[in-house]
Structures are given as C-alpha cells and as structure tokens.
Image: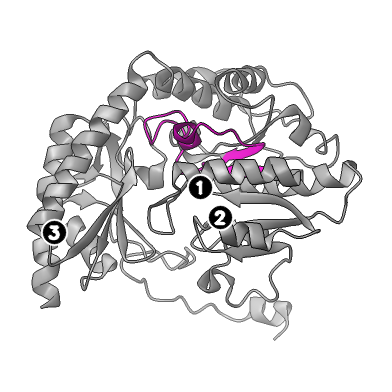
C-alpha cells in the first residue's frame, strides 16, 4: 500500500492497552500508573496515592524527586538560556568537564544525552584511536555476556542479547562476547584485531552482577600488556551509587574511556564520555557530535548534581545506607529462603535473585504494596533508591517488599 493511499483512508484507532494511549508506541510493558508529582523518594498520583520509589527512574534520580537544589538550578538557567548547539562555547559544559576531569581519571569529556549515546561514543573513540595510531585493523571490542550498553544498533550488538537483536537484521560486527568475570576467556579472545575491552563494573540489566576487584585489575593489566583500551560503562553504577563516585574506584583501577549518564543528570537527560588525553585523540573536529549534548539546561543540572555528590560526607552516607539496605535484604532472604536464592549488589544497586517466583510477579506485587522496584535478567529484582534515601524509608521498603514476596509466593503456589 502506498503512503498516499494509506493517508487517504480513514484511520482505525487501536483500543487502549492497560490504560496506555494508543498514540504511544507500545515498546514498554507499562504499569497503569500516572504520577503527578514527586517528593524525595516518593511519587504521588493525581488521586493522592503515594508510592515509595526504589527504582529512581532506573538509577537516574540520585537526589530523589523535585530536589530543591535541582529545581532552582534548572529554573534559574531556564530563565536565561536553553540551547545554542555545540557550534559555540557553553560555559556550563566547560565547567562540568573541568570538574569531572578533576574528580576522575579523565582529561577530556564529550557530552551527549543518554547512556546509549555515551557508550556509542566510547565505541567510536576506541576504534578511532587505533585508526589514528596506525592500526586500523584493531577495531574489535571484547564485551561480556549479560551486558547492556543501550538500545542503538551498535550497543545492542555490543550487549549481544538475542532478545534485543531479534528482528533488526544482521547486527553490526566488531564485538566478541565472553563469559562475565572470566579472565582466561578474555585472554583467549584477544586477537590481532582486538582494540578494546568494554565492561560494566556492575551489570544492572544483566541481573546485578558485580565484577570482582581482582578481575577488573586483571583486565587493566591485560589492556596495558596488549596495548588495548579499557572501556567502562558506569551509566548505572556511577555517580555515587556504589558509595564511591564510580564503582571502579573500589578496585583501584582506572579506565581509558568511561561512559556515564543517568545519575549525572539527576532526571534531566545527560550523558558523558570521559577519556584520557591519549584515548581521546582520535575524536577530532567532525568525527563525532551531538546537537543537544551538554546544553545549558543539562549542564546546569549536572553541575548541581555533582555539587551534592561531592559534598563532604555524602558518599560515606551512601555507604552507611547501603549497609543498612543490605542487612534488611539479608533478613528478608532468610525469612523467605524458599523464594529468595541470593542477595546481590554493591552500594545502593542491589538485587534479589528469585527461585520459582517470577520477577514480573514480584514487581507487580510490589506495586500493590505501593513500592516501586525494577526487574532485571536472571530473575532478579533491582532496588535502586535515591542516594539520599532516609533510613526509615529503607526500613519501610523492606516491610513492603516482604509483604510483596508473601503475595507473590501465595499466587505462585
């Protein structure tokens, strides 16, 4: 049917699904919930129902909802200047780049809008680095089973998840997938075309799998020995979520390239590729870009998030809250040993691996307890509260989660 013929025929509107407007593409299995406002760790519907948010927009709202400092920063900037493009200097972007460089391994920053874009930029930077170094054949990247690096064609190819790849034709080449945390498999996969290794220090979508410190140190040593670049994807594990500014700091290693997003914007779309001077040298004028990346609105919020996370005592407080949450989850696992197989995670990126109860059923049961949690692969439910969550809210979440487990177990029996 031609486009002109289709346009001339009357439209038949699809029936709403689960309350969702048929005008919205059904790419998400959404809960039939519409939130009107948020306060800290709570989301509130138009009817006034309050939900304790332990998903944080999938590890995004590190300071919770409607944080006064973020509201003030965005409002102040919105009254002055929204967008100019990267054809001109952006003062807030330069300030944020300098501050991120001062706080990390990096010398340079490229700004974009999402984690997928930051990972895509990292892939391009690694390939381009070897090209300008006289080794264009070194374009392949070793990645890991269970990885999730975004939803672009290149990043789903990097992740290698068959469900994400299905129906999109031949995936872009250049990625070699090996078992997670298997240093022997990594070493065996290195060949003359290998240019980099890319890994999440904590796999989020993959089921809250934490890379052992000795494994990350082994990857760094391999990269140094084989002249490879080490790429870290800290989109979900970064910006204080593990109790350090970035998760790799626990292992005492530094990458050459690192993708960050989610938490750095505190709810405003912002992604960043951080790089050493050496690793960044392939990305010169015209090789990459972003119209919106690092615009005045985004970097005003990003600078304010960084202000908060770098304040004295903030990360130490996250570590204390993480210990409290881990203790509560351990108690829940003991209480529900017939349902919970394992407690996983680091800091405030935690998960429960379930046995016979399906994670989707537990997520639904948690909604019925006015608690919001997030599913992950390997039948794991994720808990990703705001980093400034209160101790009493952690305890409340534990009680609601325990009741949801009871509810899911009863439904499954």
Disc 3, SS: helix
Cα–Cα span, label 2 and label 1 = 7 Å
Residue with the mark numbered 2: 183
Q: Earlier in the sequence, mark 2 or mark 3?
A: 2
The residue labelled by disc 3 is 404
The residue lying furthest to the right in this view is 134
Q: Residue at x 36, y 71 (%)?
A: 16
The mark found on residue 215 in the picture is 1
Q: Is residue 105 left or right of residue 314?
A: right
Q: Main secondary structure of the magenta part?
A: loop
Q: Which portion, as a residue range, is magenta? A: 230-259
Towards the viewer: 298 or 77 = 298
Say which residue appears at 54% left-offset and 20% top-offset. 77
Residue that extends furthest to the top in the rendered view of this protein? 312
Residue 303 position (above or below residue 230): above
For residue 342, above or below residue 65: below
Where in the figure is residue 409, as x and y percent of width and height?
12, 69
């Amino acid at each position: 049917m031609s486009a002109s013929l289709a346009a001339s025929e009357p439209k038949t509107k699809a029936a709403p699904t689960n309350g969702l407007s048929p005008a919205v593409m059904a790419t998400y299995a959404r809960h039939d919930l519409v939130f009107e406002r948020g306060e800290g760790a709570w989301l509130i519907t138009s009817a006034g129902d309050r939900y304790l948010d332990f998903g944080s927009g999938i590890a995004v709202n590190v300071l919770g909802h409607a944080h006064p400092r973020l509201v003030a920063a965005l409002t102040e900037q919105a009254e002055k200047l929204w967008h100019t493009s990267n054809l001109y200097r952006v003062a807030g972007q330069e300030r944020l780049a300098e501050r991120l460089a001062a706080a990390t391994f990096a010398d340079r920053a490229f700004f974009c809008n999402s984690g997928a874009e930051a990972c895509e930029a990292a892939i391009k930077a690694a390939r381009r680095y070897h090209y300008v170094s006289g080794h264009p054949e070194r374009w392949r990247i070793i990645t890991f089973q269970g990885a999730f690096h975004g939803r672009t064609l290149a990043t789903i190819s990097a992740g290698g998840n068959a469900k994400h790849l299905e129906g999109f034709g031949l995936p872009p080449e250049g990625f070699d997938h090996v078992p997670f945390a298997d240093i022997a498999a990594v070493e065996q996969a290195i060949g003359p075309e290998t240019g980099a290794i890319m890994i999440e220090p904590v796999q989020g979508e993959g089921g809250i799998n934490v890379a052992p410190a000795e494994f990350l140190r082994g990857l760094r040593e391999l990269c140094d020995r084989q002249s490879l670049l080490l790429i870290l994807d800290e989109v979900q594990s970064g910006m204080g979520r593990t109790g350090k500014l970035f998760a790799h700091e626990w292992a005492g290693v530094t990458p050459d390239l690192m993708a960050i997003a989610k938490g750095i914007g505190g709810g405003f779309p912002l992604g960043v590729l951080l790089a050493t001077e050496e690793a960044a040298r392939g990305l010169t004028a015209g090789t990459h870009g972003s119209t919106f990346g690092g615009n005045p609105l985004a970097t005003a919020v990003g600078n304010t998030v960084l202000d908060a996370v770098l304040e004295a005592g903030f990360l130490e407080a996250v570590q204390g809250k993480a210990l409290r949450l881990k203790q509560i989850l351990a108690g829940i696992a003991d209480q529900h040993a017939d349902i919970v197989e394992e407690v996983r995670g680091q800091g405030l990126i935690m998960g429960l691996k379930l046995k016979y109860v399906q994670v989707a059923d537990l997520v639904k049961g948690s909604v019925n307890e006015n608690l919001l949690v997030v599913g992950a692969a390997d039948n794991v439910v994720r808990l990703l509260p705001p980093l400034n969550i209160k101790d009493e809210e952690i305890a409340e979440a534990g009680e609601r989660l325990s009741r949801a487990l009871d509810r899911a177990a009863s439904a499954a029996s």
